[in-house]
Amino acid sequence: MTLKYKKTYLKSSHSGFTLIEAILAAIILGVISMIAINSFTEQVERARLKRAVQSMINFTKLVKSKSMSNNSKCRLSVNHREGKISVSNELECAGIGSIRLFDSSEKSNGIRICGTVMTRNLDMPCEENIDGSDININGLPKELTSYEFSSTGHASIGALFKFISPKIKKGYCTIVTSPVGLIRKGRIDRNAQCNFTN
């Protein structure tokens, strides 16, 4: 009789999962899903940054081309807070208008834009709470940075911009060199400096 009891007990103990096994499986699935969500969020944010930088570069190239074809100078202004680039001398450089660097639904959504006309300032501070943009007469960072193309396509005023996402701690730079008028994109390296070598 004791032998029969042991066989029945052993058979029933091997079917199904124990509570501990179920809890461990849930914890493992939770950790894996958190890693996947964080990775996805980082990829989305990185794509937003790249899209904003590429929009700026494309619009800048368009304005440079228009300034040469219209034989007039074109001045661009970047509003850091709104993420908007516009032609500020519409009379001389007509028919171009402005663009938003972010979709109207997303706005800047935490992405910080800093800008300066001092194009050698590759280590300009630009973080969530620090804005190293040019300073206005009140000692505050300017919300607008302007740069200008001559009728020959040269930049009479150059500019450097940093696009930073505090969410993923990554960023990109764009530069319009003066007087040549080169338009380049680079990455912000781990020393918070613009790197245009790639």
Image: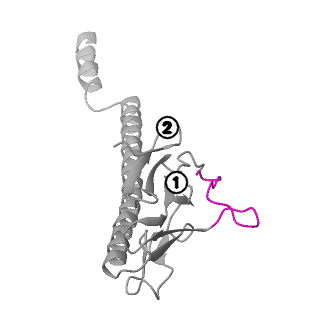
Would you say residue 139 sits in the magenta stretch?
yes
Q: Quadrant of the C terminus?
A: top left
Relative to 191, is 102 on the left or the right? left
**Helix, strand or loop status at disc 1:** loop
Q: Is residue 171 above or below residue 157?
A: above
Q: Which residue is mark 1?
A: 119
Residue 11 placed where, x, y %? 23, 22
Q: Is residue 66 above or below residue 115?
A: below
Residue 63 placed where, x, y %? 37, 74
Q: Is residue 25 above or below residue 46?
A: above
The residue sitting at 38% across, 58% down in the picture is 182
Residue in the foreground of this view, choosing between 69 and 55: 69
Residue 117 placed where, x, y %? 56, 60
The residue sitting at 45% across, 85% down in the picture is 92
| Residue closest to the far right | 138
Quadrant of the image occupied by residue 8: top left
Q: Amino acid at mark 1?
A: Thr
Q: Amino acid at mark 2?
A: Arg
The residue sitting at 63% across, 60% down in the picture is 134
Residue 86 placed where, x, y %? 47, 77
Residue in the foreground of this view, choosing between 39 and 7: 39
Instruction: Identify the coloring.
Output: one colour
Would you say residue 11 sits in the magenta stretch?
no
Numbered range of the magenta stretch: 126-142
For marks 2 and 1, give the CA distance: 19 Å
Q: Which residue is mark 2?
A: 190
